Amino acid sequence: MSSRLDDDTWTWPCSRAEITAGLRRMYADKSLTLSRVQRLPMAGRRPSIGRIQGLTAHFDRSGKPGSLSLVLKEPRGTTRAGLAGVGRREVGVYAALAPLLPFPTPALIAASVGGDWLLMTAESESRPPESWTDEDFVRAVDNLVALHDRFWNLEEDLEAFTWLARPLQADFSVHVAAAAQAIGRMVESGRPETLAGSPWRMRLLAQLTTQADRVAQPLLQAPPTLMHGDYWPGNIVILADGHQVVYDWQMAGVGPGVIDLLTLVMKSRWAFGELPIQAAELVTRYRRGLQERTGALWSDEEWARLWDHALMWQFLEEWIDILAASPDAVLRARAEELDVSWLQPVAQAVARRLPAA
């Protein structure tokens, strides 16, 4: 059932009854009545997939007025054709896994069963992602260690949550096919020219997809855990007390934790340039933390191999498709950054780990 906002003609997907029921659960107060819902602009942050809207719910509790800032998300489609809907995945995390996580997430107020929409609390950030300090990155790594430790080697237990992604297992062929199709579109259209017009770049993409099994093999041998799937400052709110709230669980899945760590480092570099702390320090802290908690120990060579394969997989799974859909002007403007941040490191990893075609 759809309704309309009090001060706008924008159609919204949830009913007043659903919002009221969610607020009553949150406050454990059956007397709560919803008086008004006000639409608010969303500043800065955007969801990775779908539409997002800020709301303020005004209500009365036992005769006393109150209000709560909320975020309404309407995910669109799936991350890949043939995979579970991203909304269903995120709703599943908030509804079933949030109490088990070692850090806070937004509170889920209401959601559709299929994940077509979800309503959650909005968190006020004290610092935007581009202003993170070295201490913020260290805390993010510590939280990641705690998350991966909590679900370390619990792959069989996580099978109960069928909506979680399995990128290197059940979903593997879908991701590889999507990358191959993206390369095919580039070859056919000659766009984007930055990639399609460069023989060495196209050979690099082709080698990744044709040897995807080799790319995945070391990652499959690593202990599986619960992965956020898109863990970086853009999906983490820093509160006034320094604590971090992690949201946007649309890519949550089961796999090796190194992928989450690599995403934190690589995506932050791509978005912000130089970080306030060296990536090597974050990697060392993560490895040391996992060793203390789980006993997991990698030699430097073993870790370097794992990191290379995580880098190749991340590029294959996500970036080939993104780059194929990127306008020429955008890639030309960031051509040097793309080379330094992604293409050259991936090419070096391929040269070290994959036999020549």
Image (cartoon, helix red, strand yellow):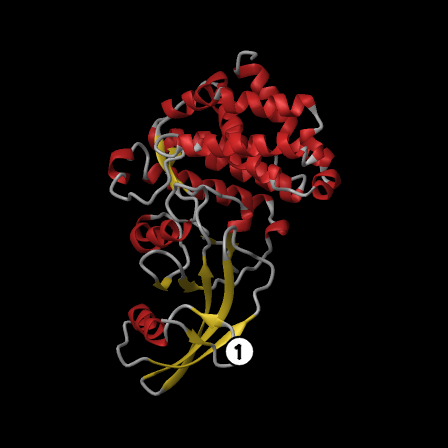
Residue furthest toward the front?
188
Residue in view at x 37 percent, y 22 percent:
221
Residue in view at x 59 percent, y 56 percent:
127
Does residue 93 appear left or right of residue 7 in this picture? left
- Is 124 located above or below residue 128 in the figure? below
Relative depth, front residue between 81 and 335? 81
Q: Amino acid at mark 1?
A: Asp
Q: Is residue 286 visible?
A: no
Callout 1 crowding tier (Cα within 10 Å): few <14, some 14–19, many ≥20: few
Residue bearing mark 1: 8
> At which x and y percent is residue 60?
37, 83
Query: In the picture, which quadrant includes the C terminus?
Result: top right
- Is 272 located above or below residue 36 in the figure? above
> At which x and y percent is residue 90?
39, 52
> At which x and y percent is residue 87?
40, 53
- Is 204 located above or below residue 87 in the figure? above
- Is 119 located above or below residue 57 in the figure? above
Q: Quadrant location of residue 294?
A: top left
Q: Quadrant location of residue 337?
A: top right
Residue furthest toward the bottom?
63
Q: Secondary structure at mark 1?
A: loop
